[in-house]
Each structure stands twice: as structure tokens, then as C-alpha cells.
Amino acid sequence: MENIEKKDPRELLDMVYIRLDLLERDVSEMAKREESRGKLIAINELLEEIRDILNVMRVKC
């Protein structure tokens, strides 16, 4: 991973958003074919909550 210490807060938030997108895609794909669909849906809801929190942080930065 790149040196995150040199990044400004907005760049760090963008990095988190990118990783959240990747996680959401993976969870969505897995939920379509896994038996543990309920758990994956719960994970997806947590990811959405994290995204909401980050949106508020981005506005405040």
C-alpha cells in the first residue's frame, strides 16, 4: 500500500471509499450464491452505514 502518512484527509477518505466499493461488490456477488446470505446482507448494511459516516466526514473536512 502507498504511504498513507503523506495523504491529506480527503485523499484518505477517497481511498476508503474505493475499498468500500470493492467490498460491496464482493458481498453482493457472494450474497447471490452463498448459504450465509443473511450474514452477508448484514455486512452490506454495515458498509452502507460506514459510507454514510464517511460522507458526513467528507463534508466537514
Image: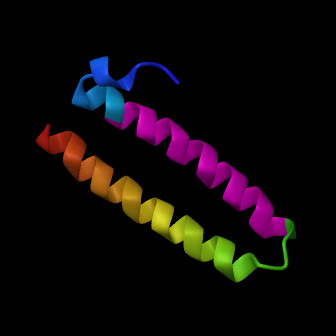
Residue sitting nearer the eye, 35 or 4: 4
In the image, residue 29 lies in the stretch drawn in magenta: yes
- Relative height, residue 27 to residue 38 (above, below): above
Count the marks. Answer: 0
Q: Position of residue 33 (x, y in %)?
A: 87, 68
On screen, residue 35 versus residue 49, left or right, reads right
Observer-nearest of 61 and 1: 1
Over which residues does the magenta segment extend?
13-32
In the image, taking residue 15 as reference, residue 52 lies left or right, namely left
Residue 15 location (% of width, % of height): 43, 32
- Return the residue found at the far left: 60
Please check the rendered image and state whether residue 61 is part of the magenta-colored stretch, yes or no: no
Image: 38 above or below 22: below
Q: Say which quarter of the image contains residue 30.
A: bottom right
Q: Residue 40, position in %: x, y? A: 67, 71
User: Is residue 56 shown above or below 22?
Assistant: below
Identify which residue, 2 or 52, lies in the foreground.
2
Classify residue 34 by image quadrant: bottom right
Q: Classify the position of the C terminus by image quarter.
A: top left
Residue at 77% x, 79% y: name it: 36
At 47% from the left and 68% from the top, the residue drawn is 46
Secondary structure mostly seen in the magenta stretch: helix
At 68% across and 59% down in the image, what residue appears?
Answer: 27
Q: Residue at x 66, y 78 (%)?
A: 39
Image color mode: rainbow
Residue 54 appears left or right of 19: left
